[in-house]
Amino acid sequence: MTEKVISIDGIELLDFYGVANSHFNRICDLFPKLKLVARGDAIKAIGNEEEIGRLEERMEALELYYTKYGHISVSVINQIFQGGLPQAEREAADADVIVYGNNGLIVKARTKNQQKLVELYRNNDLLFAVGPAGSGKTYTAIALAVGALKNREVKRIILTRPAVEAGERLGFLPGDLKEKLDPYLQPLYDALNDMILPAKLQKFMEEGVVQIAPLAYMRGRTLDNAFVILDEAQNTTLPQIKMFLTRMGRNAKFIVTGDLTQIDLPKKSDSGLERAVGMLREIDGIGVVEFDNKDIIRHALVSRIVGAFEGKEATEKSEAKTEE
């Protein structure tokens, strides 16, 4: 007689158990040789070792289905626990998907340059994604990171940003250092919350599987078996970006994202992103993707706003040269 506890950390508990435990009861019916005891976020299974192994396989398939489609029903349980989804159906569904997010969210590369980023990721360990706000640079990068973690290609995800003020001053913000920095890191939390269930994300963060920290915290570290993203890299100096890139350890993937039109450093010329891309773009194993206004997938007005500002900046530069 074997006894094993199987955790349920990939499915919201209300969805897993169903109304009046209807889903759980159906699973019990499908495994009559096992005694199954519900224990909150886990199931205690008692019985034949081989039968418990079969239950674990079906539970993994159920978690995968829930991750992809965001729902469970008795008919879904019947299909998965009595044979699983057909292989052809699974392959067709997975063809262009980077990762399956929460509540049935499907994250795909939706523009030409997003697709290029995904393609270059397969053959390069360091990528630069440079372009305007709203073009999906960071979101696509985080989707690739979550996909790599779910596929067990890496053991952890590390997301970092330089803590550079964009009009505000950190010293005047309330709270301790973490609370002062969290607003700068919020876009990274938002993307992760789209792709990893809240309870599971909290667990990952407590265990260090997912880490979000300011760039200064990267100094002195060697990042092995990790997918590391440096966001807002236009606000790093050349020494800072060098420090970050030299953290790369074994089996690591690095993506650097930034927008050269949104430099918040006191002197825009201090930004090291453009110089780093220029120095490194021809090195084998490094890929560069330059996003543009055609990649902007936020509200339709965002693309027009970016275009208007770029047009104004170009006019001012032209006038300044004429005056010289």
Image (cartoon, rainbow, N blue to C red):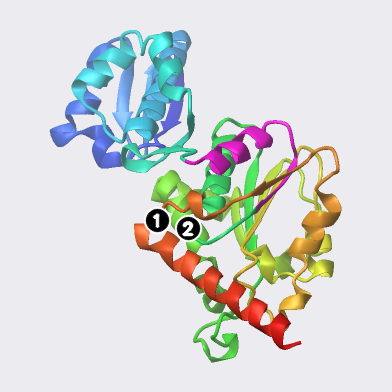
Q: Secondary structure at mark 1?
A: loop
- Residue extending farthest to the bottom is 172
- Of the 4 image quadrants, the one containing the C terminus is bottom right
- Residue extending farthest to the left is 20
Compare residues 289 and 248 and report the one nearer the observer.
289
Compare residues 208 and 296 and report the one nearer the observer.
296
Residue 184 against residue 221 in the figure, above or below: below
Q: Give the left or right position of residue 127, taking residue 3 as reference.
A: right
Residue 128 against residue 99 in the figure, above or below: below
Q: Position of residue 229 (x, y in %)?
A: 65, 53
Q: Position of residue 92 (x, y in %)?
A: 42, 17
In the rendered structure, which amino acid carries the disc numbered 2?
Gly
Mark 1, other Cα within 10 Å: few <14 / some 14–19 / many ≥20:
few
Instruction: Kindly report the distance in space between the C-alpha atoms of the residues bearing marks 1 and 2.
Output: 6 Å
In the rendered image, which residue does mark 1 sit on?
Answer: 298
Whether tag 1 and tag 2 are in contact, CB under 8 A, the answer is yes
Q: Give the left or right position of residue 278, taking residue 27 as reference.
A: right
Q: Which residues are magenta?
A: 111-129
In the rendered structure, which amino acid carries the disc numbered 1?
Arg
In the rendered image, which residue does mark 2 sit on?
Answer: 134
Q: Give the left or right position of residue 187, taking residue 69 as reference.
A: right
